[in-house]
Amino acid sequence: MEVVITKDILKANDTLAASIQRQLDAAGVYMINVLGSPGAGKTTLIEALDKALRGDLRAAVIEGDLATSKDAERLEQLGIPSVQINTGGGCHLESNMVAEALNGLKLDDTDIVLIENVGNLVCTASHKLGERLRITLLSTTEGDDKVAKYPPIFQRTDAIVVTKADLLPYVDFDMDKMVADAKKLNPDVKIFTLAARGDTPEGVEDLAAWIREHTMAFRDAQKA
Ligand code: MG
Ligand code: ZN
């Protein structure tokens, strides 16, 4: 039965994800899974976050893509250590891919690992990768109805980051409705609104502060 096979594969994925988490806990490295549609602004956000966190936290990036290494090259040019995973057409990352990618990073010189998942609002939601935190992007151009239409990903995330907020006057995006839908699914979800593109990003600092807080709490927990 196909359903059973799918469940077994997911179970194997979760078991490996738990072992990745133990490995990173021992190394004192905090990993964040960044999810969202193609074009939601994941790479742009990661660039802006690295800039905001630099000096406090050393970030490294695992880039998931179907075919190219364009985003990893973009990050390398900015001096952000990154490892590319090409899924060969696969529509989400799995923990075995992340386990291998981590071998390509210097964990001793890393405080946080940001995973840029494949652009996809569906099956990325059901694959744990060993992360301690999930951030799901929703760009204003996608429309406020995506939370209600793709519930699992917004239910299983720690934060929703509304990107391209500078375009709000030009698109159909009802922020209050989106927030109400999100809180119905996930009462504890944190919601950030930002415009990360360009020389004067807005709202990135709040998200960076929240990540800093979580990373410090993680470190305290590891020491205890
Ligand atoms: Mg990207
Ligand atoms: Zn998939």
Image (tube, rainbow, N blue to C red):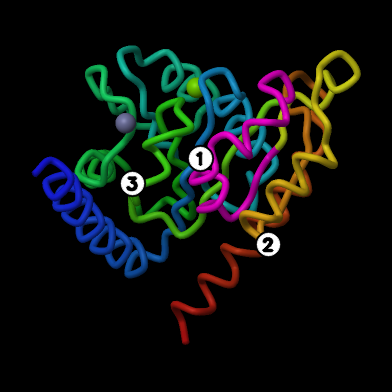
Residue linked to disc 1: 34
Q: Position of residue 191 (x, y in %)?
A: 73, 49
User: Where does the image place residue 41, in percent across and percent down from the top left?
Assistant: 61, 24
Query: Which label number is shown at residue 187?
Result: 2
Q: Is residue 22 above or below residue 57?
A: below
Q: In which quarter of the view is residue 189 placed? A: bottom right
Image quadrant where one finds the N terminus: top left
In this image, 90 relative to 142: left or right? left
Q: Amino acid at mark 3?
A: His
Q: Is residue 87 above or below residue 112?
A: above
Residue 60: x and y in percent read 45, 41
> Disc 2 beta carbon < 8 A from ligand 2?
no
Residue 25 horizontal side relative to residue 153, left or right: left
Q: Residue furthest left?
A: 1
Q: Which residue is mark 3?
A: 127
Mark 2 to mark 3 CA distance (whole Å) = 22 Å
Q: Residue furthest bottom?
A: 224
Q: Name the N-terminal-most of marks 1 and 3.
A: 1
